[in-house]
Structure formats: structure tokens, C-alpha cells
Amino acid sequence: MEAISQVAGIKYDDLIEVLSELCHICVRPYPHVVETLKFLKERGIKIVVLTDTDTAIALHKVNAAGISRFIEKIISATEIFGSRKNSYIYQKLFEFLKTLNYVSDKKQILVVGDDIERDYNVPRRVGLQALLLSKEKIVPGSIRSLKDLISLFE
């Protein structure tokens, strides 16, 4: 965000304010997100958002969507680890979550995302569980809606 503010010639705080206003106008959660996150949180499942975007942007999006009360942590892969497109990131994510005492074993992490390589294949290569969020049944670990997670934890 600081780099953007410098390039645009806008003060960082002003840029954050504009971003916050835009998020509150434009960002809405997908269907079933709130009920699914609430269900998972009530069962003691820690929800961590791993994103390629800037933490400040992700935080504003989560707040605007009204789901911040369900999220334990927001982690920017690009800010902390580099990129999500390689297994190094998921190995580092496991180590980081282990230091927070969120997990003790890789199998306790479930990655859910819509990119077959980044969110499904890469985490599985390092021993994490993964589900692909896709309208089509592309791989055995595909779910059509986030709501499908509920049946996995009932």
C-alpha cells in the first residue's frame, strides 16, 4: 500500500480511507459464507485467511464483508513469504501456525480455495489437506459451495 501511495502521489492514510469506503460499498460475502464461518467458529475451528494481497486491503475487505468476527488471522503470503504458488509458502504457513499453537500437525490444516494449482495441488504436495471450491467437480476434493464444508464437520 505504501508503494501505491507513493506512485499515486496520495498520502498513505488518505489511500486507506478511500480503500475503506470503496470496500464498504463494493464488498459483499458470497452466499453461505457467513453461516459457514459461524458454524466452523462455533466448533472451535480457527479460520486463517491466506491471501496474495496486501494485509491492509484484505483487512478492509474482511471488515466490509462483515466476517471479521470469524477470522483469527489474516496472513499476506506476498508480504511475509513471497508468493502462494510454491510449496515453500505452505511449509512456512504450517511452521507459523505451529508457533501460534493453532496446529501441531499438517493434517490439521485445510486449505480451501478456487485455484487448482495454488489452492489445491501446491498445499497437498507439502502434506496439507485441500479442497477446491469449484462449480464443476474437477478433482476428488472439490466442493461446489462453501456451505458444503458444514457437512464435513457435522
Image (tube, helix red, strand yellow):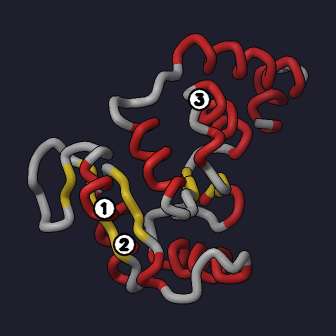
Find the residue positioned furthest to the left: 137
Q: Secondary structure at mark 2?
A: helix
Please state if 130 lies on the left or on the right of 39 as rendered.
left
Q: Nearer the viewer, residue 151 or 132?
A: 151
Instruction: Classify mark 1: helix, strand or loop.
Output: loop
The Cα–Cα distance between marks 3 and 1, rounded to whole angstroms, is: 24 Å
Q: Which residue type does callout 2 highlight?
A: Val
Say which residue label 2 marks.
122
Q: Which residue, given by chain and number where applicable, does mark 1 sit on? A: 154
Relative to residue 59, is residue 137 drawn left or right?
left
Q: Amino acid at mark 1?
A: Glu
Q: Which of the 4 quarters of the picture holds residue 15?
A: top right
User: What distance separates the C-alpha of mark 2 from that of mark 3?
Assistant: 29 Å
Q: Could you say where residue 34 lies in the image, as x and y percent from the top left?
A: 46, 36
Q: Work out which quarter of the rendered image holds the C terminus and state it.
A: bottom left
Q: Residues within 10 Å of mark 3 (few under 14, many from 20)?
A: some
Say few, some or many: other residues with alpha carbon within 10 Å of mark 1 (under 14 / 14 to 19 / 20 or more): few
The answer to which of 90 and 12 lies nearer the viewer is 90
List the residue tagged with mark 3.
66
